[in-house]
Image (cartoon, rainbow, N blue to C red):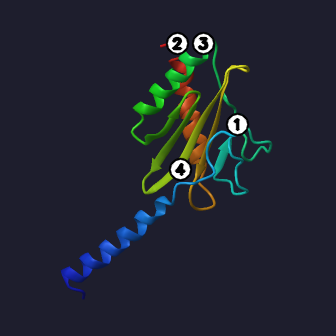
Amino acid sequence: MKTLNERIVVMAIGLLGLVGCAGDRPDNLGAQGGLLAPCPNSPNCVSSQANDERHRIAPLLFSGDPVAAFAHLKRIVSRRSDTTIVEDLPGYLRVELRTLLFIDDGEFLMDPTNKVIQVRSASRLGYSDLGKNRSRIEDIRSQFLSSEGE
């Protein structure tokens, strides 16, 4: 049987290995000409600008003032305990979304002409996210719509 110190060392090494699940921050994010980065082939990404059903998710719809709608979205994501705002530019918001030891990257891009906010959420690591990115964006959508005009 291992001593207590050996068990602690093994557990510490295991925890350090799990922390590595966060992955590196991607360098391909950001809006280029009104477009968000395309989703990879893996199913762990959703985007309102995707052409295929596997990755496609509806954008956030709003009525009224685009600046007010985007401010409303920022209030919603800033209140979430799993979300950290990484980049906040006029009409563009990038966030990190945490699930246990994993970090996903979310983006929101204002399209004032069409009265929508384009969305993208993707896992940094792995192949499948078991639908987490889709369900998280749908949760944000629900909050956005239920309190629109606050």
Residue at (72% x, 46% y) in the render: 55
Residue assigned mark 4: 104
Residue assigned mark 2: 149
User: Mark on residue 65?
Assistant: 3
C-alpha gap between disc 3 and disc 2: 10 Å
> Marks 3 and 2: CB-CB under 8 Å?
no
Residue assigned mark 1: 48
Instruction: Identify whether 74 is placed above or below 124.
Output: above
C-alpha gap between disc 4 and disc 2: 28 Å
Q: Is residue 74 left or right of residue 28?
A: left
Q: Amino acid at mark 2?
A: Gly
> Marks 4 and 2: CB-CB under 8 Å?
no
Work out whether mark 1 precedes mark 3 in sequence or the reverse, and give the earlier one. Answer: 1
Label 3: element kind: loop
The 10 Å Cα crowd at callout 1, few under 14, some 14 to 19, many 20 or more, is many
Q: Amino acid at mark 3?
A: Asp
Label 1: element kind: loop
